[in-house]
Image (tube, rainbow, N blue to C red):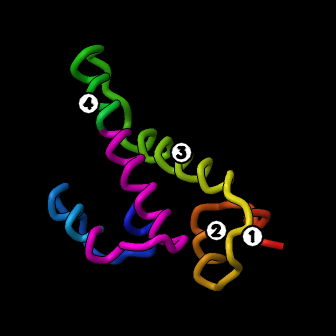
Amino acid sequence: MLQKNGIDRPPLNLDLERDWVCSNKAGNSCSNIVYKLSLAASIYGLWRERNCRIFQQKVGPAATLLIQIEEQVRDCICSWRKVKRSDKNRLMAIAWRVSPRIFEV
């Protein structure tokens, strides 16, 4: 998810990741919101996978989990309208394979 968000660093533990988000992704820019969405979707996906393993003794493939997280984030972004046209937002849309119809007319 870090690569998908254009962040070139190794993943951190949850406490350090939270601190990094607070200091580096404050504000409501499109890229900040997408990063926060992907972090929340990742945590939720891992929690669901954990519950399946504990309560149903089922282990899902990591690739499937990543696909589900990406789909959740993409679905959310696709519901947006009137996103400001900028190079940064256009690159975000390409990275997440989102239709350009999210941009303001």
Q: What is the C-alpha distance between the residues marked 1 and 2?
A: 10 Å
Could you tell me which residue is drawn at 49 percent across and 63 percent down? 34
Residue type beneath disc 1:
Phe
Q: Which residues are magenta?
A: 22-46
Q: What is the C-alpha distance between the residues marked 2 and 3?
A: 14 Å
Residue type beneath disc 2:
Ala
Task: Give the quadrant of residue 88.
Answer: bottom right
Q: In front: mark 4 or mark 1?
A: 1
Could you tell me which residue is drawn at 37 percent across and 30 percent down? 60
Which of the marked residues, 1 or 2, is nearer the chain's N terminus?
2
Which of the marked residues, 1 or 3, is nearer the chain's N terminus?
3
Residue type beneath disc 4:
Arg
Residue 42 locus on image (x, y percent): 37, 48
Queried whether the magenta region covers residue 45, the answer comes back as: yes
Which of the marked residues, 2 or 3, is nearer the chain's N terminus?
3
Q: Secondary structure at mark 2?
A: helix
**Residue 50 badge:** 4
Could you tell me which residue is drawn at 41 percent across and 60 percent down? 36
Q: Look at the numbered discs 2 and 3 and tell me whether their residues touch, using CB distance below 8 Å.
A: no
Q: Secondary structure at mark 3?
A: helix
Q: Which residue is mark 3?
A: 72
Q: Which residue is mark 1?
A: 103
